Amino acid sequence: MTLSPRTSTGELRPLPGGGRRSLWRRLGDLAARRHRAVLAAWLAVAALSAILIPGLVERAIAPVVRVEGSTSLAGARLVEQGFPQLGAEQLMMIFASATLSDADEPYQRALHDAVRAATALPQVGGVQLLPVLPGQDRRHAYAIVGVNGDQRARQAALPVLLSATKQAAGRASGSRVDVHLVGESALLAEEKRTDLADLRRAELLAVPLSLLVLLVGLRSVGAALAVMGVAGVVTVTTLGVLGLASLLGTSADTFMLAVAATVGLALGLDYALLTLFRYRHSRTAGHAPHQAAAIAVSTAGRTATWCAVGVALTATTLLVVRTPMIRAMGAAASLSAVVAAAAAVTLLPAVLVAADRWLLRRGSHTRARRAGGAGPESRAQPQVRRAGGAGSGSCIRRWVRIVGWGRGSRGRRRGRRDGWGWWARHLMRHPVAYTLACAGVLLIAAAPVTELRLGFDLDRDSIAGTDFGRGLAYMEADQISSALGVVLPHPAGTPPVDTAALVATLERDAKVAFTTSVDNGRDLTIVVVIIRTHLDEPATTALARQITRQFVPATLPPGQEALVTGPNVIFSDLMDETTAQLSTVVLLVLGCSMVFLLVTFRSILLPIKAVLMNLLAVTAAFGLLTLATRHLPHLVGSQVNTLIPLLAFTLVFGLSIDYEIFLIHRIGEHYHAIGDNTAAVVHGLRHTARPITMAAAVMVVTFAALLTAHRYHLVQLGLAVAVAITLDATVIRLALVPALMRILGTRNWWLPPPLARLLKGHPSSRRRAA
């Protein structure tokens, strides 16, 4: 990227033949000159996507939580093959009545008719009534229902099964016996319903609040609507691509839709806003609309594309986790970044040119129109007077009003150096003090992270009034809270596995309510265990591990394979997998970010600094989230969902790279043109502080909207990401990073000669060429 010296406005203009930059400029110029065709193409894509979205939502399944290669999944598959009547999943069917007991004839008829209605369904393998257990309320009865098929088929069968059994029991008992279903698919189906409702609520809140932030920051209705429109197209298009993929057979779950919608809206707003600021700057500097659009694409648009690559790169690290749900989230975030980048370099320049007359404030628009109407030579050299000139007063006053600083005579004399310029110069005079203060604030915020508690919580408050929640409450009241199976394969033709010692050991455990052993007569024995402790209680997980590690080796023949499966074990395997892979994902994100920023910045110290700062922001955010779980458990839960660190870390790291690239690119442009590190930092901070803070404010509003969700995991994700972005865009980007760059001086841009030769186009060589 070859740069010219500054213009009279301080803007760095690309020289002709600027290599890669000229390619981006040509792309922006093409999109601007053919803006009608570009707009028509994008509108057609958005319209088609809008048609596909309803079908996507209807076909979306609950997240697939089973871990590929886990013992719980292997055990579930053996049960499905060896016991077709138990199916791929075992649900608990709960019968409950307020007036009848299980000894009453209408209650018995209800049980009989409901079981017959269930077994008549093609997806049901069989139904097995459980005996009455000690302490059980006699108004309740329980049965295990085996459901066949994959997760999509099982979730589709749930409402049919529930409706058929409810109707049968109601007819037989005069509507005095009700039926509930509890199990893995029932829980995930409930999560799907609440997640979709929470997502709609969050989007309905995020859009008007984001628009309000844009109106206040841009002070132009047209500009705010243009940015919001581009972000809306990005979101709709991303969901449309997922809808098309689902038509072709690719599964999409509700978490995937939530990530795609939230990240798509956030990145669309982010890239559109930052590119709009560059366009406005070029227009007020005197460039014609299509020229200003081309410049915006060659600078901010190009940077936005690099940012999108960074987001996609960090999101793809989630593919190492062996859970379809996590991999789907990574794919959704990567897709959102790609669509947002494509819109930033094609759709946005077309929108900017088409809506040019509504994008600038009145004074700026008048000045831009006059300059834009001049000849080619005048457009090449922007007609803007210097700050001390006669025509600079209104421009200075307008800048001061935008930044929000005072209007004294001293500020007028300093012109555009006021506001953020004053802050940047002040920061350059006290870099060590601000570095220590900011680092201290972040370390204090991060300190509570040492007490972070991870776990799995059913979030009973959000499901209390649902069919699943009522059934679960009956089970827990009767101390029949969960079930698991010990799957014992044996060679075909051999006797069943002798499980008497294992069953006796389990029956002596206070956490076990009931146990029995069955064999399929061929090659599989299974021990069914009904557990008193809650599904999400650590004691239940501990019992499952104790069975595998202690009970089985002590009571079964040596070498006997034993696989423990069931809802608790499945969720426990998910927790173990995400916890185990967290360190792998963190290392991959750090490594990929280092390499990516090394290539982007052509520097050794800047990528190291960026990675450390992002890591500090994430840690501080989780420290504050830990405080929230300790002091506000009724709002965010008493423990952090195991999935949140994995998701929030990758999202925050990808989004933080955006602001780092925008800031450092602007500083680098100036430094490689004039060679003064301190002046470059002042210039970069002065010109990017307002766009970055506005973009961050919009991003924070988007993720903070998740705080209205009913599910704790969405609230925790929204809080962690919103806090991390707030810290990153304020404490880190506006103070800590510039202060550190002032301290490091020219060492910021040092690159060993071997790397300089490897990375062609090193900035120092470009500076010498310029």
Image (spheres, rainbow, N blue to C red):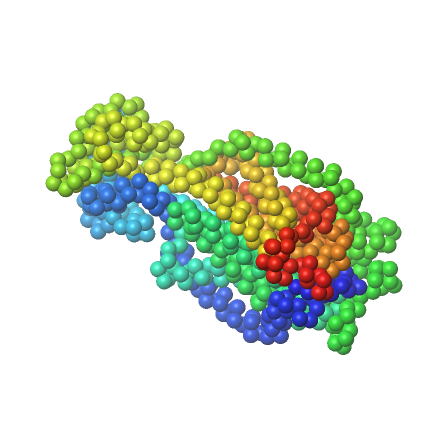
At a point 53% along the width and 50% down the height, the residue shown is 592
User: Percent position (x, y) of residue 550?
Assistant: 29, 27
User: Percent position (x, y) of residue 338?
Assistant: 52, 60
User: Percent position (x, y) of residue 698?
Assistant: 61, 51
Q: Quadrant of residue 445?
A: top right
**Does any portion of residue 419 appear in the rendered image?**
no
Q: Is residue 749 left or right of residue 258?
A: right
**Does any portion of residue 252 appear in the rendered image?**
yes
At a point 63% along the width and 37% down the height, the residue shown is 442
Quarter of the image that includes the C terminus? bottom right
Q: Kindly give the residue lying farthest to the front in the view shown.
A: 754
Q: Is residue 132 left or right of residue 679?
A: left
Residue 465, relative to residue 353: is it above or below?
above
At a point 66% along the width and 56% down the height, the residue shown is 665
Which of the two residues, 93 or 373, is positioned nearer the viewer here? 373
Which of the two residues, 640 or 615, is positioned nearer the viewer here? 615
